[in-house]
Amino acid sequence: MFQHVLVAVDGSPTGNRGLKAAIGLASDQKATLTILHAVDDMAGVSYVGDMGYVPTGYVDKLLDDLRANGRKVLTKAEALARAGGVDAKVLLVETKGRTIADVILAQARKVRADVIVLAIAVWFFISIAWTASTLLRRGAWQPVTATTSQSSSFTLSTMAVR
């Protein structure tokens, strides 16, 4: 049914639940698995910008730290996939002024994913629902599956055409 699964991860316990769900799905479907971590460079810069004057080096260091953390998250995620018997491709992508939803959707299109897996903490439900609905509004042709921190999951479908 699914040939390519894309999962967005952030390294949180809830994000790891989504990763495990994606690994299980990829294993069950004998599908390719792509693990994505997005570095939200604008969030870091706007946070720093609220502090008044900040030396350029500070912003560069912050972004370097976000990238380094993303690489660590992906290394652990890839090891978890391998332990689950699934070979995975990992992607570290910067938002470069786009939303996280735009980055996820662009990569899903690029790798031709059949399904997108997202994981959410229940208290972030509105945020992830917005991200998932944004994916659908902006043309996701694949189902978007969201796994929550409360052991439940739901699938949002779309009628959009590629």
Image (cartoon, helix red, strand yellow):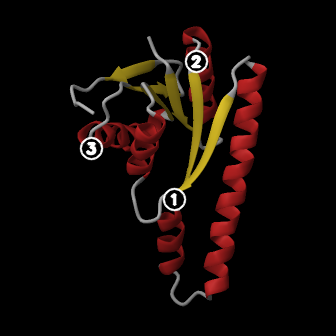
Circle 3 residue = 138
Which residue is tagged 1?
40
Q: Which mark is residue 23?
A: none
Apparent side of residue 33 relative to residue 98 in the rendered image (left or right): right
Q: In terms of image quadrants, where is residue 144? A: top left
| Callout 2 crowding tier (Cα within 10 Å): few <14, some 14–19, many ≥20 | many
Which amino acid lies under the numbered mark 2 shown in the image of this protein? Ala
On the rendered image, what quadrant is the C terminus found in? top left
Q: Is residue 49 above or below residue 95?
A: below
Q: Secondary structure at mark 2?
A: helix
Closer to us: mark 1 or mark 2? 2
Instruction: Say whether residue 146 is visible.
Output: yes
- Left or right, 142 with respect to 10, comes to left
Residue depicted at 35% across the width and 37% down the height: 132
91 up-or-down from 29: above or below: below
What number is the disc on residue 26? 2
Compared to residue 13, the image places residue 157 above or below, namely: above
Which of 30/67 is in front? Answer: 30
> Residue 37's spot in the image, x, y percent?
58, 46
Callout 1–callout 2 Cβ contact below 8 Å: no
Query: Which residue is found at the position 61% from the left and 77% from the top?
Result: 59
